[in-house]
Image: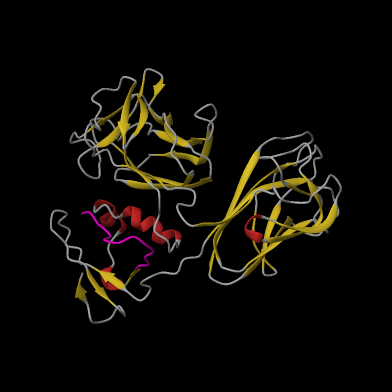
Amino acid sequence: MKIRLRSSGIFCFRFGSKAAMGVGALLKKKMWGLMVVFAMGLSQALAGEYVVDFEGPGETKGSYATGTVNLSGLDWEFAQALIRNDEGDIKNGSRAARLRLFDGVFGSITMLENKSYGIGTVSFLYSRSNFSGDRTGGAPSFVVEYSINNGAEWIQVGEETSLDGVDELTLFFAEINVAEDARIRIRQVAGDNEKRWNIDDIILTSFYGEGVCGYEPFDYSNLTASYEDGSFTGLDGIVWSYGHSRNEGDYPIDGNGIMLRRASDSYLEVTIDGGVRAFSFDYRKAFGGDNTRQLEMIVNGSQVATTPVFGNFLGEDATVYNFVHYLNTPDPVTIRIKNVGNSELIRNTVIDNIRWTCFVPCSNTAWFFRTKASGNWDEIQIWETSPNGSDNWVPS
């Protein structure tokens, strides 16, 4: 079943108990992508996503030999992997990718081109195939990785995933949240020889999609090489205040930045009047001290999120991390970024590339949707809408 929205914009959906269908049924009816959105609690339709369902013209590959296939406009390399529609393939539609380990070569599918506008999330369906022997012995396991430097280096997303006992399509979902043009690869890392497994319906969302409201690269800051208190007017006339902070010095991320020193009195603060959906920034260790660094995001006086611990070892480190937190508020917010706690220990940290997206209200928050679940996947289903979820149901 395909769902088409006749107009662009922001939509919110509520599903009442009368419309409840099992997750497996929703997956089989090609609605899992929407369910991901609902599960994340996002009110904004995903914009700029890249979808691979292996159903397009020419999206086939008949052998396991390493080769290139174009999927939804971008080239991929398939090694010990193919695209077929055999009875033993577990698929959502006509075709799916199939991978295996053979003679020491693990199956993998790798993007050879970048997706523009960054990657926010990656999701796809996976299952063991159902050919002879696929569901006995050592099950395959895989990892998902992404690259922001054209495949020169790869960063793993989440943990290694095992297919042990996975005999129907199961959802893999992970956040990547990189603003740079990026690519992914999915590769098998364990399992018995010639145990086959399938992948279908890959979705890469953009880091933000549309709706970026603000960006601060510190190009107009008045920060110097000395730790000082002060303020500056950045892009779009927004005023940023800081305490006991300096410029990036020898530890830049992308040109100019701000360096925080300690938790007790170093901070960066801004008030954003128009509401915020998502707020993000890049950060890295500065200097070589081994004191533990961890940043916190304080909104209207209350801590709402922290970064992972980083930099707690002797020596310099050029690794750049990205932080993103979803506020989803229409109200003015005062955001403060600082090291966690009130310690006077030196915890030098550089921040750069602050971005936030606009809050966009739902255009139909009062509407409820329902349909019946007949168990017959070939039967056309009629969707009904209601303003209150209890009566006045009308076919949509």
* Quarter the N terminus occupies: bottom left
Is there any visible trace of residue 196 in the rendered image?
no
**Residue 323 in the figure: left or right of residue 146:** right
Residue 204, image x, y percentages? 41, 44
| Dominant SS in magenta | loop
Q: Residue at x 49, y 36 (%)?
A: 146
Q: Which residue is at the far bottom?
A: 391
Residue reaching furthest left? 379
Residue 284 image point, x, y percent: 69, 42
Residue beneath the point at 72% across and 46% down: 257
In the current view of this chain or complex, which residue is farthest to the top? Answer: 103
Picture layout, residue 7 above or below residue 248:
below
Q: Is residue 316 magenta?
A: no
Question: Is the image coloured rainbow, by chain, by secondary structure, or in one colour?
Answer: secondary structure
Occupied quadrant, residue 316? top right
The image shows residue 341 at horizontal and vertical percentages of: 77, 59
Q: Disc count in the image?
A: 0
Query: Nearest the camera: 243 or 8?
Result: 8
Q: Which residues are magenta?
A: 1-13
In percent of width and height, residue 327 lies at 56, 64
Quarter of the figure with the C terminus: bottom left
Horizontally, residue 13 falls left or right of residue 246, namely left
Please give left or right for residue 201 compared with residue 303 in the image. Answer: left
Relative to 211, does residue 101 appear above or below in the rendering? above
| 297 horizontally vs 180: left or right | right
Residue 247: tell me if it is visible.
yes
Q: Nearer the viewer, residue 276 or 371?
A: 276
